[in-house]
Image (tube, coloured by chain):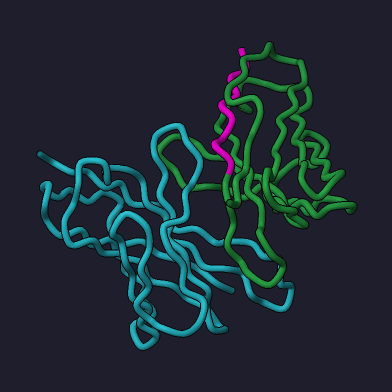
Chain colours: A green, B cyan
Amino acid sequence: GAVVSQHPSWVICKSGTSVKIECRSLDFQATTMFWYRQFPKQSLMLMATSNEGSKATYEQGVEKDKFLINHASLTLSTLTVTSAHPEDSSFYICSARLLATTYEQYFGPGTRLTVT
Amino acid sequence: AQSVTQLGSHVSVSEGALVLLRCNYSSSVPPYLFWYVQYPNQGLQLLLKYTTGATLVKGINGFEAEFKKSETSFHLTKPSAHMSDAAEYFCAVSDQGSSNTGKLIFGQGTTLQVKP
């Protein structure tokens, strides 16, 4: 149980285009999902917290107009990187919180974004 | 505010040897603590967690961790390393402040190398 999927697993796009990444909880409902960014050999950097039916809460320094997050249902959150640039190339990982009463998160397999 | 420090960014052991990965935390409230493992180009997998109750926690793949409040530590151990244990390991503490965001605060990670 507690499986989280991400799609696509990798994507290459041209500078200036937008890319959408999907995060789905497959066998549970997730009221809260999280989006992380990870640079090589580094820890995870939380970008935003996404609650179903409400606006995402962004961490300091994360551009909300550039990284659009939508959490339209209890099983799906999306991250759209708008007007992507090469510096947006990274590994993006989502996670879902199983229950509101616990704090463990279940992580997706990640999406490798390369902007050329 | 909570924080996590992982001592040693890189640990190398021989196959069959004891694995010890160190984690110290800072928390103003009773912490929820987690260890995650990440294999290359993958998301994070939950190894084990401590919330309340027994301070020695057993996880998957033969790993265990002991919560020591007096030392503010949550070190991860495995009696006998296997080649397949080579990966990146992250210790995390939950954000249980008044905001109750459910966020996890991650340590910087420890790379475990297992030598034949």
Comparing A88 with A69, the one in front is A69
Magenta-tinted stretch: A108-116
Q: Return the x and y of residue B35 as percentages of the image width and height.
A: 42, 60
**Residue that appears at 79% across and 41% down:** A69
Q: Is residue B4 left or right of residue A70?
A: left
Q: Return the x and y of residue A13 as percentages of the image width and height.
A: 67, 14
**Residue that appears at 71% across and 30% down:** A21
**Residue that appears at 42% across and 55% down:** B90
Q: Is residue A17 left or right of residue B62?
A: right
Quarter that holds the C terminus of chain A: top right
Comparing A25 with A78, the one in front is A25
Compared with residue B62, is residue B88 higher up or lower down, i.e. above or below?
A: above
Q: Extreme right residue here?
A: A53
**Residue that appears at 74% across and 36% down:** A79
Does residue B108 show up?
A: no
Q: Return the x and y of residue A72 as percentages of the image width and height.
A: 87, 44
Q: Return the x and y of residue B30 as percentages of the image width and height.
A: 53, 83
In the image, residue A32 lies in the stretch drawn in magenta: no
Comparing B1 with B75, the one in front is B75
